Image (spheres, rainbow, N blue to C red):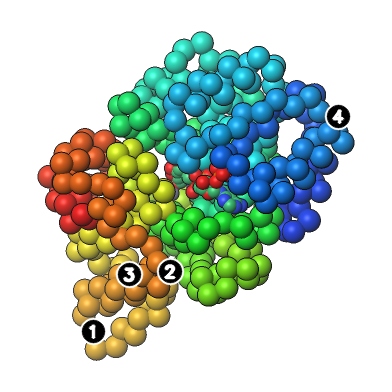
Amino acid sequence: MLGNFSYCNLTKLYFGDESLDYLNTELPKYGKNVVLIYGGGSIKKNGIYDAVVKILKDNDKNVAEIAGVMPNPTVDKLYEGVEIARGHQADLLLAVGGGSVCDYAKAVSVSVNCDEDPWEKYYLRFEEPDCETLPVGCVLTMVGTGSEMNAGAVITNPKTKQKIGHVFADEKIMPKFAILNPKYTLTLPHYQMVAGIYDIFNHICEQYFSGEDDNTSDYISEGLMRSVIHASRSANENPQDYEARSNLMWAATWALNTLVSRGKSTDWMVHMLGQSVGAYTDATHGMTLAAVFLPYYRHILPYGVQKFKRFAVNVWDVNPEGKTDEQIAGEGLAAMESWMKELGLIMNISELGATEDMIEGIADGTLIMPGGYKVLDREEIVNILKECL
Ligand code: NZQ
Ligand code: ZN
């Protein structure tokens, strides 16, 4: 490893099918006023809401709710939640849901005591909070984003068609605790399960496909990717396979809690392309990534052949004998493509609702990140997006 870095993660994790009990350990650490934040109602159908509310009552908490946090939470919903949290004088924001709900809670946390417009401050100007923030706790019900153990919060502005993620610099924005019960993920629809699986895999790729030094982070990433591939096949065959779902949950957390990015410049262009597609279509996050990865990776492969070759051999067990580096690298991508088809992922942006006349706008909304094997220009972005149709 050649980089200079620091590493700190402040989230305490409780993992396993009995992990919700530990909410009883965490709640006494915070004041009386809790804001319970959740999505469109899945937690009411599967019983998680009742279980959490009982523990809140047992701990004598005074609870207000922010319900209806949508997938890809919007800036208007953020303003609404800030008012509720202010009115309740919240001591703790308890997010119960997937990445959207966890991200949203973090966005409320940095906005409650902020005098300025949080969209402009945090998402357009990318500033850091200079006010008091609120602690966030998380009970995770959907696996993929890693939001349960990182300081990222993605917010969408449907009016300006911008979907922007801010990874806050200060670790104190990370959830103070996260409860990871793999059983909670068993009620996810197949579409969400596989979208989450690809999100995990792509997070690892975004960090892996950068740099040329011999880096421990890459070896950890390869192990995580092999585990995700193995568990995804078991979960796809039998979605009620607890062991597979539990490995996916754990891998998702480690894929994006800053560990495997240490010492790496990191790429993130699949996410930048996918997020801009998401701003135009409101499609499921993991699917937007699956729909753009192949044209992008084929485009950058010539600039990072050695890494794509290593990926093919170490992650996909491609036999290198008698083949050129380019052939081996290409076979790795082909193996990844067939795994994605096996899972039933959507692999073009048309099926997600994108049309040719949106391409220029999607390209305008794609932030260019400089850390990968090739820094794209606008024309390359437009060409890649056209191929994704
Ligand atoms: O809203 P409800 O009714 O709860 O339904 C949700 C939602 O429709 C449903 N769901 C969640 N848990 C369930 C369940 N349905 C049945 N049983 C359960 N146990 O699943 C749907 C999707 O949920 P959502 O939270 O939107 O999914 P995800 O976890 O993929 O989060 C996506 C958001 O996270 C952002 C994305 O951009 C997107 O806005 N990301 C956050 C990141 C971070 N913080 O680091 C990184 C990621 O790359 C990503 O950008
Ligand atoms: Zn993602």
Name the residue at 58% across, 17% down. 83
Q: Which residue is mark 1?
A: 323
> How packed is label 1: few (under 14 Cα within 10 Å), some, or many (20 or more)?
few
Nearer mark to the viewer, of 1 and 4: 4
Nearer mark to the viewer, of 1 and 3: 3
Q: Which residue is mark 2?
A: 343
Nearer mark to the viewer, of 2 and 3: 2
Q: Identify the disc placed on residue 60.
A: 4
Three-letter amino acid code at the position of disc 1: Lys
Three-letter amino acid code at the position of disc 2: Leu
Name the residue at 66% across, 28% down. 65
Does 288 sit left or right of 10 as displayed?
A: left
Q: Is residue 220 above or below residue 158?
A: below
Q: Identify the disc placed on residue 337.
A: 3
Q: Does dot 3 land on a helix, a strand or a loop?
A: helix
Q: Earlier in the sequence, mark 2 or mark 3?
A: 3
Q: Earlier in the sequence, mark 2 or mark 4?
A: 4
The quarter in which the N terminus is drawn is bottom left
Does 135 sit left or right of 192 as displayed?
A: right
Name the residue at 46% across, 20% down. 118
Residue at the far front: name it: 45
Does 31 sit left or right of 245 as displayed?
A: right
Name the residue at 53% across, 15% down. 114
C-alpha gap between disc 1 and disc 2: 28 Å
Q: Does dot 1 land on a helix, a strand or a loop?
A: loop
Nearer mark to the viewer, of 3 and 4: 4
In this view, the residue in front, 9 or 54, is: 54
